[in-house]
Image: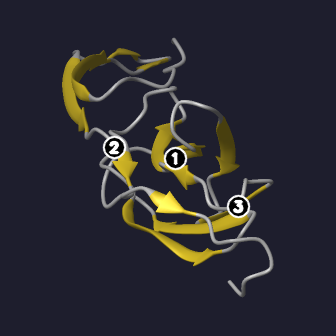
Amino acid sequence: SRPVTPLEAGTFSVTVTASNALGTSPPRVLTFTIAPLTVPGDFRATEVGSNHVALAWSAPASGPTIDFYEVSNGSVQTVAVEANRLSFLWAGLTPLTRYSFRIRAVDTAGNPSPWATLPEITTSAAGSPP
């Protein structure tokens, strides 16, 4: 026997036999497909303040088990968000500054989905209501 480790998306075939005191069964080929992750859905900013942006999304519609989400504010910084969370508050931002946010899911084999992106968001002026 051999353990099956997480696989990338694709179609795979394995040959299986069973053994017991009476002998070994004829080999049987099993074929299965692992669908690639789709992009997280409904990615949106739910609140924009002077120093923060609240982000939310829905889980990808198909694919293997998600390990975590990567949320990025452009090319500056990327954070990992637990798979069971569908929102993130990006704090410590600068007032009246444009940010580009994006998100992707990463499965348990380390395979990322495509990025979902938002149009550029500008934080509000300091002291203004969210």
Q: Amino acid at mark 2?
A: Leu
Q: For the point 69% across and 71% down, which residue is it?
A: 125
Q: For the point 68% across and 40% down, which residue is it?
A: 79
* Residue 64 coordinates in the image, percent (x, y): 40, 44
Between the residue at mark 2 and the residue at mark 1, the CA separation in whole angstroms equals 8 Å
Query: Would you say 58 lies left or right of 99 here?
Result: left
Query: Would you say 91 lies left or right of 27 here?
Result: right
When the figure is inspected, residue 86 is found, relative to residue 112, above or below; the finding is: below
* Residue 100 coordinates in the image, percent (x, y): 47, 48
| Disc 3 crowd, CA 10 A, few/some/many (<14, 14-19, 20+) | some
* Residue 97 coordinates in the image, percent (x, y): 60, 54
| Disc 1 crowd, CA 10 A, few/some/many (<14, 14-19, 20+) | many
**Residue 48 sits in quarter:** bottom right
When the figure is inspected, residue 110 is found, relative to residue 19, above or below; the finding is: below
Q: Nearer the viewer, residue 125 or 113?
A: 125
Residue labelled with disc 2: 37
Residue labelled with disc 1: 66
Q: Dot 2: what SS?
A: loop
When the figure is inspected, residue 121 is found, relative to residue 72, above or below; the finding is: below
Q: Quadrant of the C terminus?
A: bottom right
Query: Would you say 68 lies left or right of 35 here?
Result: right
Residue labelled with disc 3: 95
* Residue 27 coordinates in the image, percent (x, y): 23, 15
